[in-house]
Amino acid sequence: MLYLVSTPIGNLGDITIRATDVLKSVDLILAEDTRQTGKILQRFKIESKLVTFHEHASEEKLEWVISKLKEGKKIALVSDAGVPNLSDPGGKLVEQALKHQIQVSPIPGPSALTALISVAPFACSQFIFLGYFPKKKGRQTMIKTIQESDHPIFFYESPHRITKTLNFLKDHLEGFNILIGRELTKKFEEIRFFDLMSQSDIDTIRAQGEFVFSLVKKK
């Protein structure tokens, strides 16, 4: 059995009872960053063996994990935070598990995307999520996608690119509002909603922590 376990996006208190039960019961926990996951294991007294497994894992490592699953081992995959395979590693391992007729099971939980959706001041019954905003290549194409969409579009962004990205969007997207979630669930959580053309608002966004944002056309 392969479990895909969602973990807290900041506040460790958001982990589910089921998630901790599964992490305690498995033979191995595959973690994107063992240091980050180690904090969860220590907090909830979880003693399962922790093994590094990330998007750049070798084919040999992937084959080793599949061999353990075929032996009957129970394994949990976690990302640094949030939902595995949502702009995080997971898909390749699940593909191989299903190919070898190994059962997979999702253990749902926290997500920065759904956390921001829950506080959005606009309807989100339909939306588009496009992962991380392109670094360089594809930015102009992405602008066209945003302009042509009738639904809110959500992205992730890293702190060292957020200022550049916001100014790029301002220069290309007149007539849009932006919703920004920074450090969601953490001590310095910040949620902002403003006209994308407002340079004063952009200038006061602290380029620290993890970001998720949404662009929506003004009505």
Image: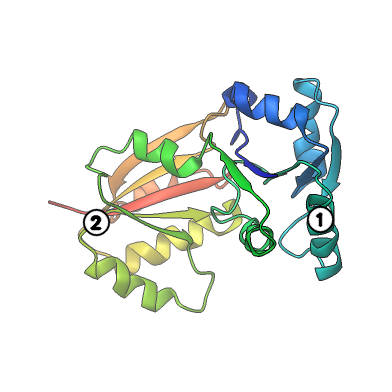
Q: Tags 1 and 2 in contact by the CB under 8 Å rule?
A: no
User: In the depicted view, which residue is nearer to us: 53 or 119?
Assistant: 53
Report the side of 138 relative to 135 (left or right): left
| Quadrant in the rendering for residue 117 | top left
Q: Position of residue 188 (x, y in %)?
A: 55, 29
* Helix, strand or loop under label 2: loop
Q: Position of residue 205 (x, y in %)?
A: 46, 44
What is the count of numbered marks?
Answer: 2
Q: CA distance from mark 1 to mark 2?
A: 40 Å
Q: In the rendered image of this protein, does residue 215 appear above or below residue 56? A: above
* Helix, strand or loop under label 1: helix
Residue wearing tag 2: 151
Q: Residues within 10 Å of mark 2 (few under 14, many from 20)?
A: some
Q: In the rendered image of this protein, does residue 106 appear above or below residue 54? A: above
Q: Which mark is residue 100?
A: none
Q: Identify which residue is drawn at 61% across, 32% down.
A: 10
Q: Identify which residue is drawn at 57% across, 25% down.
A: 14
Q: What amino acid is labelled 2 in the image?
A: His
**Residue 209 visible in the displayed image:** no
In the rendered image, the quadrant that contains the N terminus is top right
Report the side of 25 relative to 119 (left or right): right
Residue wearing tag 1: 65
**Residue lying furthest left in this view?**
219
Indicate which disc, 1 or 2, sits on the residue closer to the N terminus.
Answer: 1
Q: Position of residue 85 (x, y in %)?
A: 58, 54
